[in-house]
Image (tube, grey):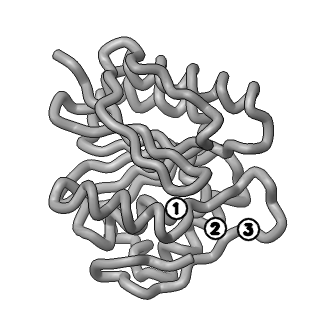
Amino acid sequence: MRVIAGTCKGRRLAAPKGDRLVRPTADRVKESVFSILREQVIDANFLDLCAGTGSIGIEALSRGAKHVTFLERDPRCVGIIEKNLRTCGLLTESHVRIRLLRRDAVKGISDLGKRSAVFEIIYFDPPYGVDLVEGSQLYTDCLKSLAENSLLRVDGVLLVEHAKQYITPNAVGSLRRSRQARYGDTVVSFYEKSL
């Protein structure tokens, strides 16, 4: 796993070994998604939700995102994110482009909503493939909470990575699915906020 492009291009990123719950986004999926986003990443406030290794958020920083919030509940993963940020030279005391929150996804979304946080891009990649029923509930709860807390800007995009077996809803509250991209067994659903 590596940073694909930008100021940190080529840096190798660490991942927990032998952990079924952490499934980093494949480099080819990451590369395709950021090719779709293109300049939208530049100067964006970016939320890496269920951040895992931090690979997606670090890619966003490398490509010019103004600020990235990493939201992850697992303390081991939080340690890996910090290690990866250090590897890329992004974790310094003076670095104001990063917020790392150790929270459960739904509670974290609610906390960000209370702070009136708003993002141009949200990447939601929960650990899927372990339990489809449990995973489906996490998708449902998080999408509902994202809509209720209005974390996505009107001109922003929410990307939801999931297994091809999981069917994402066409709409959740103010969020409307606008497209899907499939990469083997992985699908990324794109949502926009309706007025």
For the N terminus, the image quarter is bottom right
Q: Name the secondary structure under disc 3.
A: loop
Q: Which residue is mark 3?
A: 16
Q: Pointers 2 and 1 in contact (CB under 8 A)?
A: yes
Tell me the kind of residue under disc 2. Answer: Ile
Q: Quadrant of the C terminus?
A: top left
- Whole-angstrom CA distance, mark 3 to mark 1, is 12 Å
**In whole angstroms, how far apart are the C-alphas of marks 3 and 2?**
7 Å
Residue furthest to the bottom: 10
**Which residue is identified by label 1?**
54
| Left or right relative to 36: residue 161 | right
In the image, which disc is placed on residue 80? Answer: 2
Asked whether disc 3 touches disc 1, contact meaning CB atoms under 8 Å apart, the reply is: no
Circle 3 packing at 10 Å, graded few (<14), some (14-19), many (20+), is: some
C-alpha separation, residue under disc 2 versus residue under disc 1: 8 Å
Identify the mark nearer the N-term, 3 or 2.
3
- Tag 1 or tag 2, which sits nearer the N-term? 1
Mark 3 and mark 1 lie on one chain; the one further toward the N terminus is 3
* Residue 64 relative to residue 61: left or right: left
Q: Kindly indicate whether the residue at mark 2 contacts the one at mark 3 (C-beta within 8 angstroms).
A: yes
The spot of residue 21 in percent (x, y) is 75, 51
Residue located 37% across and 42% down the image: 122
